[in-house]
Amino acid sequence: MHTDVVIIGGGLAGCSLAYFLALEGIEVIVIERFELNKLASGANAGSLHCQIPHTEFLENGECWTKRFAPVLKLMKQSITLWGTLEKELKSDLEFSQAGGLLIAETEAQMRDIEHKAEFEREQGIEMEILARDDLLKMVPYVSDKMVGAAYCLDEGKANPHKATPAFAKAAQQHGAKIFHYTTVDAIEAIGNGFNVKTSMGEVSAKRIVNAAGADAGRVARMVGVELDIAGFPIQVNVTERAAPLVKHLLYFAGDRLTLKQAKSGEFLIGGGWPSNMNARTNQLSVNPDSIRNN
Ligand SMILES: Cc1cc2nc3c(=O)[nH]c(=O)nc-3n(C[C@H](O)[C@H](O)[C@H](O)COP(=O)(O)OP(=O)(O)OC[C@H]3O[C@@H](n4cnc5c(N)ncnc54)[C@H](O)[C@@H]3O)c2cc1C
């Protein structure tokens, strides 16, 4: 079998690229070892971030912040793109863009937030600093012990269960092929392209794209390239459904805590707390300490 482009990985990166290539009339095959959207793309909290992460800002200092900051422009463009996708893919992705609030409990945290906002504004991100009264007017359910917040107008959210399948469906409608339960085991460079050896046979292609997520390092090694990429599992707590209350993304400046409410009513409470992974089987399980601390 031959094609123009083989994409290794059926997550958001692989399926969105398949869509945009197929749209240009390029022949494309996506090869996915499980079902589509099974790993990071389907198991994240669906936040569309556009801020410098606060914990990293505090821990890594100004040098790191200056190196990271230009990425914000890409994030902003990405959220603009998200805003057009529902129409383009003819799919309800539960996209909304109500903005994000980084909330402070102390004056010292407030100063950190204001300092971070200076770097963000330099990159064209709209940041407003809110005093306690303005914060409570905007989100009255927040404790009145909070002293203020930074409001990032660009941030939003979408449903991770819907985005990748919508791209995959649209890609297939434009002629892309998707192979499920097919693992790429080896890649061989041939005259004018590559021979991709999979668990279901061989596919040759002019180009290959490594969209293997946390396994991108392993795939790169198949062509002798070392990529310093690794995955680590984090967990999110999901509550029962409740009436609409929280429309913003909320972050807390005092610890690892994020909160949002899905369109279907569940609250998603996270902040990057680790889950357990069995080192032998890679099987994931809930980490009770992370639930408690979160
Ligand atoms: C709604 C939404 C909001 C998001 N918001 C943000 C955000 O604000 N900021 C941000 O940084 N990120 C965000 N993300 C991105 C997200 O956190 C993940 O980083 C991203 O989805 C990872 O996509 P991926 O396709 O690279 O990897 P994955 O989803 O992990 O997909 C990789 C795929 O490759 C397959 N694979 C690996 N090796 C092989 C092999 N040898 N053969 C065949 N298949 C293989 C795996 O099985 C897997 O399915 C968001 C995603 C969504 C859906």
Image (cartoon, helix red, strand yellow):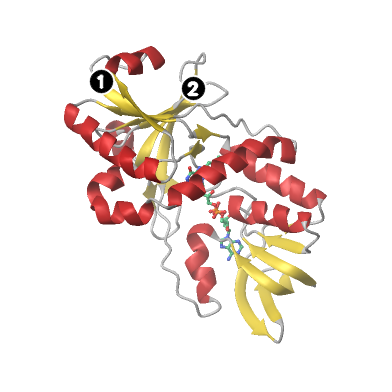
The disc at residue 61 is none
Residue 145: percent from the left, percent from the top? 23, 17
Residue at 54% x, 70% y: name it.
Answer: 219
In this picture, residue 221 sits left or right of residue 32: left
Residue at 67% x, 75% y: name it.
Answer: 197
Q: Quadrant of residue 183?
A: bottom right
Q: Quadrant of residue 2?
A: bottom right
Residue 17: percent from the left, percent from the top? 66, 56
Q: Amino acid at mark 1?
A: Met
Q: Residues within 10 Å of mark 2 (few under 14, many from 20)?
A: some
Quickly name the residue at label 1.
146
Residue at 67% x, 58% y: name it.
Answer: 181
Nearer-N-terminus badge (2/1): 1
Helix, strand or loop under label 1: loop
Name the image quarter holding the N terminus: bottom right
* Label 2 beta carbon less than 8 Å to ligand 1: no
Q: Quadrant of residue 7?
A: bottom right
Give the vertical position of 4 relative to 247 (above or below): below
Looking at the image, can residue 152 be seen? yes
Name the image quarter holding the C terminus: top left
Residue 231: percent from the left, percent from the top? 43, 57
Quickly name the residue at label 2.
247
Q: Amino acid at mark 2?
A: Lys
Residue at the limit of the structure toward the bottom, as seen here: 191
